[in-house]
Each structure stands twice: as C-alpha cells, then as structure tokens.
Image: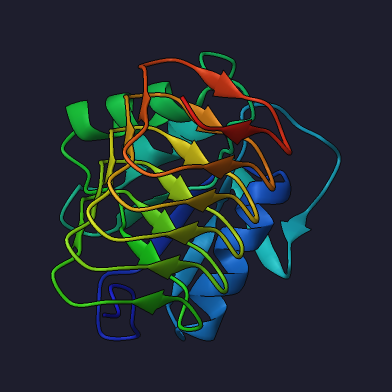
Amino acid sequence: MKMISSNLRPVIVVGGGGHAAVIIAVLQKMSAKILGVTVAEDLGEKDVLGVPIIGNDDELNKFHPTEVIIANGIGMTRPGHSNRLEVSKKAREKGFQIARIIDPTAIISSNVEICEGAQILAGAIIQPRTKIGQDSIVNTGAQIDHDCEIGASCHICPGAILAGGVSVGETAVIGAGSVILPSIRINEGILIKAGSVVSS
C-alpha cells in the first residue's frame, strides 16, 4: 500500500521540525517530488534534509489545490498542544488534500482502513480489521493488533503496543513504549504516559 509515489502531485511539507524531517525521509524513499517546506516562523535554517524552506504557510496561497498535495510535518506529543490539527483543518478549508503517508518498511495486513492524512512510519505493524483515523500518526515501530480503532488526530508514539480490540478516542496520545491490553477503551483527548501498561 503506497500512497506517495513519483507519479502523484508534487508535495509541500508544512512544518520544519523533527517530525517534518521524518516525513521528508519517507517521501524521499518513495521518490516523491517535494517542492519545499513551509514553516510558521524563521528558525534560521534554509532547508530540511536538503528540501528548501520556501517561506511561511502563506506560500500555500500561491498554489491551486489541484496542483499540489500537502504533507503535515507537525508532530503531536500531548493532546491539544500542537498546531497539527489546525494546519490540516486550514489546508482542507482551502481545498487541499492531505497526503496519506506510509513508510515502505511498515507492515500492514489486509482489511486495514487508513484514512486521509494518516501517517504510518518506519517499522510500524498494523494487523487486520483495524482503522487508523484521519490525520493520526502511527509512529516508528508501533504495533497495532487486530480489530483496533484509532480515532482522528491521534498519535501512537514510537514503540507503543496496542493489543487486539483496543479503541482510541480522537486526539489521544499513546506514549512511547506503552502497552494497552486487549479490548481497552482510551477516551478522547487522553495522554497515556510513556512506558505505561493499561489493563483496565
């Protein structure tokens, strides 16, 4: 399942931090044409992994929504403490599509639904009958077992493990290395701290 390839529209990455670098690295693996990076404020850098910073988010106004696709390069470490959701919302209001990005090293079973704007990063594993909601991140090495449902705008952090039948509400963050045991419901907007084990 490869969403980004060289025959699709050129990509503009919004955000110039660490998560943007990860997204750019995936796009480069897929030989996508990246036009540039936009940043909210000048950090004194000229590029991210060799991709030029072309200005702030107003640069998007120079493109018609049919000309480019947007890759959301803003991460989210705590619920409600990120511009990630606002970036996607504003881009969609202007008519842009948000790229669904899947690292080629991810292992994704059949009967998995991955919504627009979701990002599946290096080494992630997603098992059957699972849904990954719009704009959610399944980060490096995370494992999601069968019959899970990840709501919109969630972040499953690196190395997190979700056993079968887990449900994660919108905007929740499952911390790095945490383990969620079978059939647990994580409510909307919850932060599960790194290394936690959730059993009830």
Q: Is residue 73 left or right of residue 58?
A: right
Q: Residue at x 72, y 70 (%)?
A: 50
Measuring 19% from the left and 65% from the top, which residue is drawn there?
112
Give x and y (percent) for residue 154.
Answer: 42, 34
Which residue is at the front of the view, 143 or 60?
Answer: 143
Name the residue nearer the viewer: 148 or 108: 148
**Nearer to me, 35 or 158:** 158
Q: Residue at x 31, y 56 (%)?
A: 99
94 above or below 190?
A: below
Left or right: 97, with 163 as reference point: left
Q: Position of residue 104 (x, y in %)?
A: 45, 83
- Going by the picture, which residue comes out furthest to the front? 200
Image coordinates for residue 87, horizontal then vertical, percent: 41, 29
- Left or right: residue 10 versus residue 9 is right
Number of numbered discs overlaid on the protein picture: 0
Q: Is residue 184 above or below residue 177?
A: above
Residue drawn 48% across and 68% down? 34
Q: Quadrant of residue 21?
A: bottom right
Is the image coloured rainbow, by chain, by secondary structure, or in one colour?
A: rainbow
* 106 sits to left or right of 54: left
Q: Is residue 139 above or below residue 40?
A: below
Residue 79 pos. (x, y %): 53, 18
Quarter of the N terminus within the rendering: bottom left
Looking at the picture, tell me which residue is in the foreground, 116 or 59: 116
Q: Which quadrant of the view contains residue 179?
A: top right
